């Protein structure tokens, strides 16, 4: 679960980087616009994954134990 959440958070971060640098929203482009239902679901899933990753800050060696 940790690796999946971390991967989704990285995807979200890269998407924000694209928005900041180029003004390009890859999720919206791929899933049919930022207001489409599918894009909104992807945004919500990425947000939930990011919330899960907050717990990684408070656990000792969470990622190292999984490897």
Image (cartoon, rainbow, N blue to C red):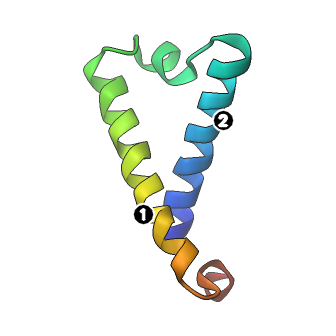
Q: Residue at x 62, y 13 (%)?
A: 24
Q: Mark on residue 14?
A: 2
Does residue 1 lie above or below 8 as drawn? below
Q: What percent of the width, then of the height, locates residue 38?
A: 31, 25
Q: Residue at x 41, y 57 (%)?
A: 51
Q: Quadrant of residue 39?
A: top left
Q: Secondary structure at mark 2?
A: helix
Q: Mark on residue 52?
A: 1
Drawn side of residue 23 relative to residue 38, left or right: right
Q: Residue at x 66, y 35 (%)?
A: 14
Per the model, the C-alpha gap separating discs 1 and 2 is 18 Å
Q: Residue at x 46, y 17 (%)?
A: 28
Drawn side of residue 54 relative to residue 17, left or right: left
Q: Are marks 1 and 2 in contact (CB under 8 Å)?
A: no
Label 1 crowd (10 A; few <14 / some 14-19 / many >=20): some
Q: Quadrant of the N terminus?
A: bottom left
Q: Quadrant of the C terminus?
A: bottom right
Q: Secondary structure at mark 1?
A: helix
Q: Quadrant of residue 21?
A: top right
Q: Residue furthest right?
A: 21
Q: What percent of the width, then of the height, locates residue 32?
A: 40, 12
Label 2 crowd (10 A; few <14 / some 14-19 / many >=20): some
Does residue 16 lie above or below 45 as drawn? above
Query: How many marks on residues?
Result: 2
Q: What percent of the width, then of the height, locates residue 20?
A: 67, 21
Q: Residue furthest left?
A: 37
Q: Quadrant of residue 23?
A: top right
* Label 1 or label 2, whichever comes before in sequence order: 2
Q: Return the residue nearer the eye: 60 or 40.
A: 60
Q: What percent of the width, then of the height, locates residue 27?
A: 50, 24
């Amino acid at each position: 679960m940790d690796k999946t959440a971390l991967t989704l958070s990285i995807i979200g971060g890269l998407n924000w980087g694209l928005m900041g640098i180029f003004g390009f929203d890859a999720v919206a482009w791929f899933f049919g616009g930022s207001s489409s239902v599918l894009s909104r679901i992807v945004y919500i899933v990425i947000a939930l994954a990011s919330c899960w990753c907050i717990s990684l800050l408070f656990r000792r060696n969470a990622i190292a134990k999984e490897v």
